[in-house]
Amino acid sequence: MDDEVKGIAVARAYFDDVVEPILAHRFPGLGYAAGRLGPGSDVLGLDDATSRDHDWGLRLTVLLPDDAAEPDSIAAVGEELDRMLPDSFRDLPTRFAFTGETVIRHRIEVDSLSHFLASRLGFDPRAGMGVQEWLSLSGQSVLEVTAGAVFVDRAGQLEAVRRALAWYPRDLWLYALACDWLRIAQELPLMGRAADTGDDAGSRIIAARLAQAVMHLTFLLEQRWAPYAKWYGSLFRRLPLADAVGPAVDVILTGTSWEERQDAIAAALQTLLNRQNGLGLSSLAQATVPFWDRPYVHPDPAIAAELLGAVADPEVRALPAGRGSIEQRTDNVDMLVDPSARLATVRVTDR
């Protein structure tokens, strides 16, 4: 296969040429949605030749409307597809095993829309999204619903959910932005202090953490959901602000002295503050200020205060000032990939 061929294009052709005709013949009038959703590099359009060594291929998601999605109906659609699918399409097998599995079967995920959403997000947004539901979302979980291609949506419900998940409500956006400024303020002076004590490794570790926070703040200001670690830098480089912030991030990670790294962080933060001001979210001119009488800097505390002061929703105003979304609280993979754990953690810690 041509190295330039993407999984989304293969999935679209598979649906158009094989799967849709089967569904139209065997289940006429079924108001389903179908596309390439869920996990996988191809969902983000980032798959390449290496991606094909596991879990890549003829994959689709078919979502039945809830009023037609009894377990027997879901099973019937899956079984009929299994019965009628050819062995291969464009020289790719229609049935294969995933990593760590031995069962060879077709990889058309048939589910109800409500269960699919709950399996990725921890809840169904159509039932309403409160503050805790929004904060329990990781960027990757949202991208598994919104980033892929939808080939057909006969009832329009999936596209409505994708629009609803486009971005945070304004007050939660302000809150998340403030939390990133606070996260950076908590550790930026420590980078120089660690180096001054002779702990270069510790200083560089702090610098890497700060680089991640700077990048996350960039995603927030661009109103884009951030993916999980493997594709974090790749999608960051596609952000419009990355042209200005990216070179500073490179220096944060590679600078030979803490002073060089600190200057790069300060430059990145100034660019981000200018963008934030341009969006009408803040008005302060200087991103960083001295840290007491030491030779270190940190973000001006007034930046986070101004963002939080603009929050109108009393429930958001009552949130702990520096905690933020689940991915601002933890980078533990087992937590971030578990929708129920994410939501439970936010609910418990924000009581």
Image (spheres, rainbow, N blue to C red):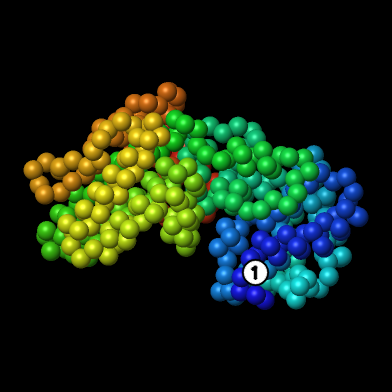
Q: Position of residue 123 (x, y in %)?
A: 60, 41
Left of 288 or right of it: where is 49?
Answer: right
Q: Look at mark 1 in the image and give the residue it sits on.
A: 5
**Along the viewing direction, whichever of 155 and 327 lies nearer the viewer:** 155
Q: Residue at x 40, y 49 (%)?
A: 241
Quarter of the image that includes the N terminus: bottom right
Q: Position of residue 158 (x, y in %)?
A: 69, 43
Tag count: 1
Left of 344 or right of it: where is 37?
Answer: right
Q: Is residue 323 visible?
A: no
The relative height of residue 208 versus residue 274 in the rendered view (above or below) is below
Q: Position of residue 280 (x, y in %)?
A: 39, 31
Quadrant location of residue 277?
top left
Disc 1 element = loop
* 10 Å crowding of disc 1: few (<14), some (14-19), many (20+): few
Q: Residue at x 15, y 54 (%)?
A: 193
Amino acid type, callout 1: Val
Q: Position of residue 236 (x, y in %)?
A: 44, 55
Quarter of the image that includes the C terminus: top left
Left of 240 or right of it: where is 267?
Answer: left
**Along the viewing direction, whichever of 328 and 36 lies nearer the viewer:** 36
Q: Residue at x 31, y 35 (%)?
A: 304
